[in-house]
Amino acid sequence: MARGTAQARILTKRSLITGAAGFIGSHLADHLLARGHEVIGMDNFITGDRANLAHIEDPRFTLVEHNVTEEIRIDGPVDYILHFASPASPIDYLELPIQTLKVGSLGTHKVLGLAKAKKATYLLASTSEVYGDPLIHPQKEDYWGNVNPIGPRGVYDEAKRFAEAMSVAYRRYHDVDVKIARIFNTYGPRMRIRDGRAIPAFISQALTNEPMTVFGKGDQTRSFCFVNDLVEGLCRLLFSEHAGPVNIGNPAEMTILQLAETIAKMTDSKSTIEYKPLPEDDPKVRQPDIALAQKLLDWSPQVSLEDGLETTIEYFRKKMAQ
Ligand code: UDP
């Protein structure tokens, strides 16, 4: 290696993001490029979208089409690996149950193998779904969860629980620098309009004055974090000396009916509320306890629901006009 190249190499960190064309993956790519990293984005585009990365003109970014359940080959060093590849909305993992199980298990194994070979720091995108339909509220990292392994959501929940177990095994037995973030409901630009999740569904319905589909009585709760806050929390964990698992989410809890009403008001919509059956195993409550993230990472979310929704509604308005 020429001297100049070697020096540039020491200064420039090289990061791999699996699932880079997804909602969160694409925001991570922006964030790491802005920090000066060279970024390799990997995706097989089954739920990811190239359009989420189309704005990137930075020559330090490369996009590789690859399914991470197959062997991953990358030449040269890799300093950080952020493992975000997976279908992640309930509709997606209902439609893609086997792929969801495979990417969480076989895919995680391949990505960890790469992390071990490259001596990279690895961050797993885990989820509040590891807590299932929780019997402890709010959810703390030491809660083991209440998951139905054979229910419709089991394919995602158990894949992520397995991914956590596999990641910790690589830390214990192979000394890989493994970090686990448990991501709670997140929203923002680049979510898919029809990914089935509450915020994109309600915004697109409200903007077209169609009925807003509230499942059950709408008294189930969620706590929504704006994507910029989430990415900041994830990066603080990645660059810290802490391993986690650490909850990253916004503790501002509300009912789904309150969320629908807020979006209707903010969009000046004429939409009515249409009640639909509650999906099987839909968690009744969800709220992160973020005391650990506050203590270890000095992180807490900064963006209010109104501000985050404003930005997201604007994104969907433009996207739907295209
Ligand atoms: N939900 C709803 N209407 C929709 C989509 C979702 O009432 O059109 C509800 C869903 O049943 C759940 C909550 O909103 O209770 C959040 O759902 P989402 O799919 O966004 O994420 P989850 O937290 O269930 O993974």
Image (cartoon, grey):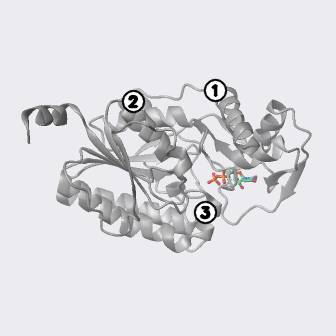
C-alpha separation, residue under disc 3 versus residue under disc 2: 30 Å
The image's mark for residue 177 is none
Residue wearing tag 1: 304
**Mark closer to the chain start, 2 or 1:** 2
The C terminus sits in image quarter: top right
Q: Which numbered disc, 3 or 2, marks the residue closer to the eye?
A: 2
**Percent coordinates x, y for residue 55 in the rendering:** 51, 38
Residue type pointed to by label 2: Ala
The image's mark for residue 34 is 2
> Considering depth in this image, is 21 or 263 the residue closer to the camera?
21
Q: Looking at the picture, does residue 95 appear above or below residue 185?
A: below
Numbered-mark total: 3
Which residue does the image show at 86% across and 32% down from the upper left?
A: 268
Dividing the picture into quadrants, the one containing residue 135 is bottom right
**Percent coordinates x, y for residue 240 in the rendering:** 30, 34
C-alpha separation, residue under disc 3 versus residue under disc 1: 28 Å
The image's mark for residue 92 is 3
Q: Looking at the picture, does residue 273 appear above or below residue 228?
A: below
